Amino acid sequence: MSEENAKTAAVTLIEVSVSDDKKQGFIKLGKQEEGSTVFTKEELLAALKAEKIESGIIDSAIEKLAQRPIFNIRIKVAEVTDPIDGKDGVVKLLVKKEAEYKPEYSEDETVDYKNLDYFQMVKKGQVLCEITKETVGIDGKDLYGQVIPAHKGRKPQVPAGKNTSLIEDESKLIADCDGIIKFVNTIGIEEMMHIRKNIDFSTGNINFPGDVTIDGDVSSGFSVKAGGNLIIKGVVEDAKIEAAGNVVIAKGIYGGSMGEVIVGKDLRCNYIENAILHVDGDITVDYIIDGKITCNGNIYLSGSKELIVGGEIQVLGELVARTIGNEREYPTIIRILGEKTIDQDEIDRLRIKEKETRQQLEAVNEKETQINGLLLSQEKKDMLSRNHNSPAMEQIGNLKKQIDRQALLFKKEIAEIEKAISYVEKKASISYYGAVSAKRKLYRGTRIYFGDMLFQFEFDSLEHCKIYWDNDDIVNGMM
């Protein structure tokens, strides 16, 4: 056999195939019946090229197969270059979301009132988060040289908010000013008024739309109003305090004769004495003496005393203390506020029906106005023609009577609907979800009301008790 014929025969003995997923290429060598069968690297590559396989060829596999042929077995000689997908961008937060931020507790699980890190305060230029950008990835190639595109990573959701900026090629988010972090979905910095002394004649009253920090006391007769959070590192004495957000007072509140505290969210302080307070959120305090307090959240006594004596407290949620009242039976009043339960769906249905009926009455009233105009016009015509009982006049009169009857029916229906709404509202029940818990003692001088119902007990004191409402009655349970 000539050399040329031998080459032709060798090529015909090279079978090229690909896997079902088109990701791998194979060569299967056949063997001549007579003599030795030899394949060169070029012949193997030519066979692959004939099948248009030109990418991902494994040179080492081709060379080994040329040097030492393996017959009648599929040998992998090519493999696609898979794309490498890009990585998603990542945001590493260096601050906490508001829902994650809690006051610090000491080892005995009581609140540390001197620790004022209740709010996250930042300085101008402080890094709020570090950002790793997404990568584009590396494209791959199939066996036929076609590009397999890589997926680009997703962009990071940078939580840039008010008074923040991106720096260093947008790899860091920093604070543009001193302030307090507001972080829900985005990080924003609320500018803060910082007063580094007492509120007194040197400063006058304070009224600021944002957050306020006061390093000293709020003196008697002065007032502080904040549109955001309020931090007072001293004491509030016979002063007026109002804040839309949270309030932290490192020492405490002494009300005096003119003092009043209004808090839109939570209040945390060391003590409350002889003070009037209205708090829409929770109160956390060590002790309360002679306080007149309304709280729409919970009241937690936490500290070395955990004591309530005297005054009158109205609370919607739970009140938890170690000791309530004292051995001298000093009058202490606690009122658990109730929540009215009403069939609102029925009220809404009746309101819609009332609205529709009023609209129908208005339409009838408009028709009545038109009929009255026709009556006047017809009366003038009849007077000129001296016809006092014209058919037109009679027809208009009958139409007016019909419209008057419709208006009367609609008015009666509206009155019935209003009566039904009043009935549903009167049927509303009041539920009391709050409770009073004494971890140590509840003394006899303490009066606890659920609405008009007074909790009564015969002993000098109760220990480890929880007073709550269940099945329209007051229950004395154990903690």
Image (tube, grey):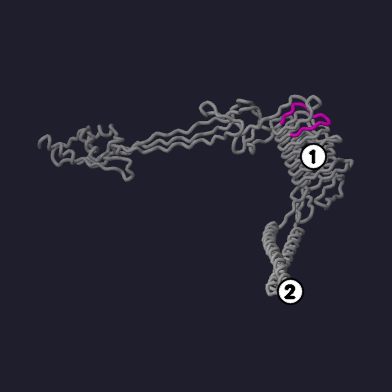
SS label for mark 2: loop
Residue 349 appears anywhere in the view: no
- N-terminal-most mark, 2 or 1: 1
- Is label 1 in a helix, a strand or a loop? strand
At label 1, the amino acid type is Leu
| 467, above or below 383, in the image | above
Q: Left or right: 46 with respect to 408?
A: left
Q: Position of residue 394 (x, y in %)?
A: 70, 73
Q: Position of residue 470 (x, y in %)?
A: 75, 54
Relative placement, left or right, of 171 versus 450 is left
Disc assigned to residue 388: 2
Image point 26% across, 41% down: which residue?
Answer: 74
Residue toward you, 184 or 29: 184
In the picture as drawn, the residue positioned furthest to the right comes out as 328
Q: Is residue 66 above or below residue 355?
A: above
Quadrant position of residue 463: top right
Gap in angstroms between the C-alphas marked 2 and 1:
77 Å
Residue 26: image quadrant is: top left
Which of discs 2 and 1 lies nearer the camera? The answer is 2
Q: Amino acid at mark 2?
A: His
Residue at 64%, 37% in the rendered image:
98
Residue 114 located left or right of residue 181:
right
Q: Is residue 387 magenta?
A: no
Q: Assess disc 1: are there few (<14), some (14-19) or many (≥20) residues with their C-alpha within 10 Å of its C-alpha.
A: many
Which one is nearer the viewer's eye here, 144 or 412?
Answer: 412
Above-or-below relation of 12 to 392? above
User: With 417 as the anchor, is 35 left or right in this view?
Assistant: left
**Residue at x-position 81% and y-position 31%:** 222
The crowding category of the residue bearing disc 2, from other C-alpha atoms within 10 Å (few below 14, some 14 to 19, many at least 20), is some
Q: Which residues are magenta?
A: 212-225
What quarter of the picture does the N terminus occupy?
A: top left
Q: Which mark is residue 277?
A: 1
